[in-house]
Each structure stands twice: as C-alpha cells, then as structure tokens.
Image (cartoon, rainbow, N blue to C red):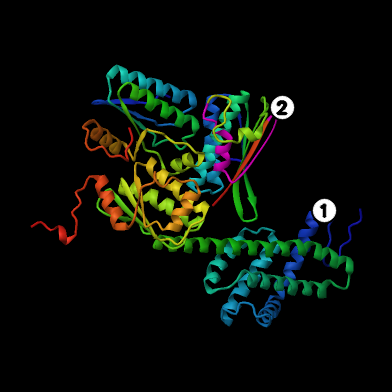
Amino acid sequence: MRTVTTNSIVSDDARDFTSNVLNEVVAHLRHEHARLRDGWIQRIVDGRYLTAMSEQEVFAEATSLYGSYLEVLQTGSVEALEAYAQNLSGRIIPRGVDVVEVVGILLVLRDVLARELFSKYGRDVSVLKRVLDAYEPAANRIASTVAVGFVRERERVIRQQQEAIRDLSTPVLPVRGRLLILPIVGAIDPPRARQLTEQLLRGIRSNRAKVVVMDVTGVPAIDVAVANHLVQTMEAARLLGAFVIVTGLSPELAQTLVGIGLDLGKMNTVGDLQGGIEEAERLLGYKVVSADPSRAIA
Amino acid sequence: MACEARIHVDSDRDVVEARRKGREAARQAKLNDGDAALVAAAISELARNVLLYAGEGDILISAVENGICRGIVVTAADRGPGISNIDLAMQDGYSTSGGLGLGLPGVKRLMDEFDVTSETGQGTTVVAKKWAT
Amino acid sequence: MAVPILKQRDYLIATVQDPLSDDEFAVLRRTLVEQVGVFRSRGVIVDVTALDVLDSFSVRTLTELGQMARLRGAATVIVGIQPEVALAMIRLGLTLGDIATALDLEEGLAWLDRKMNGIGSRDHERS
C-alpha cells in the first residue's frame, strides 16, 4: 500500500490517525494560544459572561481552562478536567456564577477553536473533515464533563447549606437526663422530615432519652406524606425505647393526621409545651412542683 | 464488587448473603444508611419469598443512574408456581403460606419503584428500585 | 453460629453477634423458651444491636418468643434496634406488638428491674 506523506496528516490505522490529527491540531492551538485565548476572552466579555468576576480573574481562569482544554483534546482523558471542573466550580459558585455561563464560555471556546481550524485547514475539504472528525467529539465531551461537574458541585453545596439551615432550625434540647425537647418551627418538606427523623433518633441514642416532647406549635401545616413520615418516626422512637409526646397540635394539623388514619387517641398529645413537659416528667417519675402561687403552702 | 451481583437462592443462608450483597451495593452507590437498610430489608423479603414459594431463584442487584440520580435495582426471579392473583397478593394481610403476608406490599412501601410480573406455572419476577435521597 | 446466652440473676441475655438466617432465628427462639423453663427466668433480653435487618420473619419470631416466654412467666425486652433498622421495620409495616423495647442492654435491665419490683404501672409501657 502506498503511504502518502504530507506535512500534516497521515496514517493507515484509524486510531493512530485520529491521534496524529489531534496531536497536530493541539500543537497548532498551543502555538497560537495567546491570540486565541485573548480572542476568547474578548467574546466572553462581549457576551457578558462571568460578570461576577474581575478582569484579572477572568484572564487567569481563561488561561487555565484553555490549557486544560488542550490537554483533554490531546490525551483524551477527562480525569484531570473533572478535577479542575470541580475545583473551578467550588471557587465560582459562591460568587454566583451560573452553569449557563460556564457552559456558555466553553461553547464559545469551542467555536473560537473551530473557526481557527477552519481557517487553517479549510483549503482542503477532505483534510478539514478529518480534523473536525477528530476535534468535535472531544470538544463536546469537554463541554458536557464540565457542565455535569458544575451541576454536581452546585447540588453538593446546596445540600450542605440546607443541612446547616435545618440543623439550626431544629435543635434537639436535652432537658434533665432522659427527656428531650424537640421544638419544630416552620414548614416541613420531605427532606426536612428526614432530617428531623435523623436528629430525633440520634438524639435519643446519644442522650439516652426515654421521653421526647415534640412541639409543633410553630408548624403551619403538613401534607400527607410528611404526616406519615412523622408518625413513622414516632413509632421508630418507640422501638428505641423512647416515648414521644406531641404538643402544640393545631386543629389543622390534627385534621391532617386524622386524615391519614391516625387514631389521635392512641397518640399522646398534650395542649402546650409546658403541659407536655409536665406529662413527660410524670411519666419519668419525677415529682412535679407546680409554679402556681395560689397553691403555695400556707 | 463488580457493577452487579447475582445471588442464587436455594437455602436459608442465601437470604442472608443476598442481604449482605444488597447492603454493599447500596453503600457503593453512596446511598445513606437509612436507604441502605431499606434495600436490605426489601431484599430479605424478596429472597425469602423466592425460597418459600419457588424453592429457588435468583436475586440480581445492580446500580443504576438516571441523569444525576443514583439508585439500586433489585430483581427477584423464580420459576415457581407464580401468583395467580397479583391484586390479591398486593393487599396487606393476604397470605397463602399462613404467615403475615407482608411480602409484596411491604416491599412496595420500602422501595421507590416496584413492579411484579407473574404467570401461573411459569414463575414470578419482581423488580424494585430505590433512589438515593 | 450459636447466639451466646448469658444468665444474669433471674434474667437471660441473648446477644446476637452476626446476621441470623431464618433457621438460626428459630433455633434461638426455641432455645430461649427452653431455658426460661429450665432456669425459671423472669426476664429475657435479646440484644439485636448487631443486626442491620429486622424483616417480617425476624419480627414474627421475636413476637412469638415474647408470647411463649410470657406463658412461662418471663417478660421479654428487645434492645439495640438501630435507627435505620427501626425505620425500615416500620415502613415494612411490622410491629413488635406487645413486646417491650429499650435502647440498650443497660436500659433493658433497668426496665426489667422496675417491672420485677412493681415500680409504677406506667400505662405507656407494655407487658
């Protein structure tokens, strides 16, 4: 078979072929990096991407990203890119940069580089085609890797923030050994319900609680799914040897619970938190001294 | 562990093994402890059903991904007598073996997705999925 | 893989250390019921801390253990149910019925002591 050698692209083996093509493309893009990167940055600014970042920051990130981009094109491995994407996301998410912007600038870079390839190899259509065949899949893979990495990182951050908020909003208060008070304030969605369950059961274990007073005065309403979840949580607490008293149940909440088939007579409910604590102490065998002055001993 | 595990169930001990593999798989798929416990309990019920009604069968456990969500799929398959009336079997409290009859309805409550196909004389296949929360 | 059973005063304490198969669970129940008769025990504690699954069979067996032990004059307490296991049990729709539960061995013993001494009759506590 005759092997034709030109000053650029050749091989009989398709794989070698693609990598040779890419090697040459990357070499060229590296050689022209200053010009191309600056062109990219200009388009970033014109397109109003990354407005939350300063000029120097954009320059620094663009330079690193450009380098990573070429590396992926050449090696075909996205591992380093994934790590970089996660790192980048960690830095820019708190600055309020959105995934739309990140994907946007990557696509702009893809276009900038593609146009460069057009102008370099455009004279010979078959060569151009081979170049694009090698370049396009790699470029698309880069865009999706970074986008997914960004989204995953953002979700991780959101989850962390939500957990921190929930921890703050539902403190488990140990009150005199064996008694826990769990004041719940605000709406409860399924993730928060799960958080509550975890906190409650963990609290029972670490405080060796035998009675828990769960005060729901501050809970406006709950849906059927959350109601079921709370009931299950109370039953689970029972299996851990703790008894749950619910206080502050509004008529609306009571109605929801009855609606899911709960026999309120079986559940121990007391009107308010104070009453609940007294009931708890009675159950635990503590003597309750009334603070009512009219009962003062003469 | 590889991406999926297949346990042939024909004895008591296999049920324990199936649960263990299920927990391992759940951990690998980064499900939290609570969800892993649900998966293990579901596998226990399904594997026991296979043993009880068909004498033997297979439990297949694999990880699945749907966009950003990760989950575990459990498939229990046997060539036993099959379930003649699935609706009846899915009612709480119904049982043909004199037990509590909490098999299938219980598993459905534990998992996020649940499907059972059965044909009398041919066998039964149950597929249940649990997604990470 | 027998479950070690200790005799402590009037009580029998069975500590499950590995996951049990259905047969092993049945053997445990049988053994405990026998020993309650032999030693005239007044209380039985089953420590399931090491179990990460309590499915319909295990719960049924434990419930039967409680009933049979009561017929022989002993109260039963299940201790050490892990939070995730408890939630899975409840989602499965299982209950331990009249059987008492406590956080751990120490609590279980305290519960039995109170019961034996007839201290208080708390309506929220069972058998």
Please name whichever residue, A237 or A274, is drawn nearer the observer in this view of the structure: A274
Viewer-nearest of discs 2 and 1: 2
Q: For the point 52% across and 27% down, which residue is it? A: B99
Residue range in magenta is B99-123
Q: Quadrant of residue A123?
A: bottom right
Q: Tell me, yes or no, whether the highlighted magenta stretch contains residue B116.
A: yes
Residue flagged by tag 1: what amino acid is it?
Answer: Asp
Q: Position of residue A271 (x, y in %)?
A: 34, 55
Helix, strand, or loop for circle 1? Answer: loop
Q: Amino acid at mark 2?
A: Gln
Q: Position of residue A284 (x, y in %)?
A: 25, 45
Indicate whether A175 appears above or below C42: below
Name the residue carrying label 2: B122
Q: Residue B22, located in which quarter of the rendered image?
A: top right
Q: Secondary structure at mark 2?
A: loop
CA separation in Å, label 2 and label 1 = 51 Å
Chain at tag 2: B
Quadrant the N terminus of chain C occupies: top left
Q: Residue furthest left?
A: A298
Indicate the position of residue A61 as horizontal and vertical percent values.
59, 74
What is the quadrant of residue C76 in the picture? top left
Q: Residue A13's mark?
A: 1
Query: In the rendered view, would you say A257 is above or below A86?
Result: above
Q: Chain of mark 1?
A: A
Q: Relative to A253, does residue B126 appear above or below in the rendering? A: above
